[in-house]
Amino acid sequence: MAATLQRIERLSSRVVRVLGCNPGPMTLQGTNTYLVGTGPRRILIDTGEPAIPEYIICLKQALNEFNTAIQEIIVTHWHRDHTGGIGDICKNIDNGTPYCIKKLPRTPQREEIIEDGTQQYVYLEDGDVVKTEGATLRVIYTPGHTDDHMALLLEEENALFSGDCILGEGTTVFEDLYDYMNSLKKLLKIKADMIYPGHGPVIHNAEAKIQQYISHRNIREEQILKIFRDNFDKSFTVMELVKIIYKTTPEYLLKMAEHNLLLHLKKLEKEGMIFSNTDPDKKWKAHL
C-alpha cells in the first residue's frame, strides 16, 4: 500500500515538499517538488506536469505559508512530469523578473525549448554548486534514467535529492542500465544520510536503499542468465522472458517490465554473455 503524502509538508527546517497533484502508476502519489532554503527566496527543485491547476494552487499556498518566493528553478531531468510545470509557474506565479531555470544538458547535446521559447535553460555541470540562504546544493551527474539526469546533495543535511534515480517506493525505469548502475554506485560513495526522492516518501536510510537498488538489478540479471544457462539451446523473445520472470507483476506494469528487461539484455549482449538475431521478432540466446 502506497504511503499517503500531504500536498504540502515541511520535511525539515530547510525543505518543504509540494506534491505535483499528478498521481499515476509511473508517478506514484505524484511528482515531488521541493522548496529548498530558509530565506525569503528559495530554490524550487522540479515542477510537476503541465496544466495541473491544483499544483499551482498548492505551490502558491506553500510560498505564502512559508513567506518566501522562488529564487530559481532546477529540474533534475527532461521528463515532462519534472519540467512540465515550468510554463504554468512562469505565467501564474509572478517573480518580478523572469525565472532562471537550470538543468544539465542532454547527451548528445540537443536544443531544448521551454514552452513558447521565450525562456532558455541555463546549463549546469557536474560538481556545480547552487546556493540560497540556508542551503547549498551540489550537482551530481547521474545518467541512466535519462541522459541528462542529476541528483543534488544538500550539504547542510547530507541529504540527496535523487530525482528519478531512486524512488521512495518501488524501483525506477532507465534508458541505459550500464550508466544507471554506475550512477547508483556513485551515489552510494557519497554516504548520504537521507534521500528526498522524485516520487514517494522520504528515505531515511539512504545507504540501505541504494544498496537494495543495486542488489535488485544484480538479482534480476542473475535470473536472466539462469534462464539462458538452463536453456542454452533455446532462443527467447523479450516478452517470453517477461512472462517467466515477472509472473506476479500486474498487467499494467508489464510494458515497463519489458522495457527494463530489454535494457538488461542489451547490457548482457554488450558484455558478450548473450547474442540476438536480426529477425523482426528479435530473439536472444546464450553464447556457448
Image (spheres, rainbow, N blue to C red):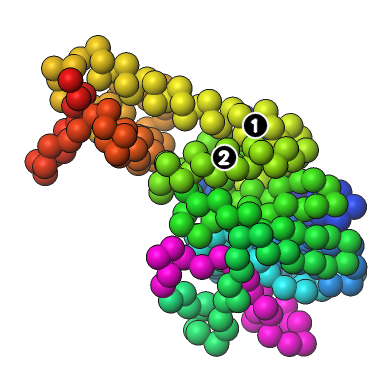
The residue depicted at 71 percent of the width and 47 percent of the height is 160
| Sequence-first tag of 1 and 2 | 2
- Prevailing secondary structure of the magenta residues: loop
The residue depicted at 39 percent of the width and 21 percent of the height is 222
Number of residue marks:
2
Q: On the picture, is 98 further left or further right than 247?
A: right
| Distance between the alpha carbons at the discs numbered 1 and 2 | 10 Å
Residue where numbered disc 1 is placed:
209
Q: Amino acid at mark 2?
A: Leu
Residue 16 lies in magenta, yes or no?
no
Residue positioned most to the top: 230
Residue stretch in magenta? 89-110
For mark 1, give the secondary structure.
helix
The residue depicted at 70 percent of the width and 42 percent of the height is 190
The residue depicted at 27 percent of the width and 28 percent of the height is 273
Say which of 195 and 214 sits in front: 214
Q: On the picture, is 109 further left or further right than 90?
A: left
In this rendering, which labeled residue sits more in front, label 1 or label 2?
Answer: 2
For mark 2, give the secondary structure.
helix
Q: Is residue 92 above or below residue 208?
A: below
Q: Is residue 49 above or below residue 86?
A: above
Task: Bin the neighbour count of mark 2 within 10 Å (Cα to Cα): few under 14, some 14-19, many 20 and up.
Answer: some
Residue 70: where, in percent of width, then height? 77, 72
Q: Can I make out residue 64 in this image? A: no
Q: Amino acid at mark 1?
A: Lys
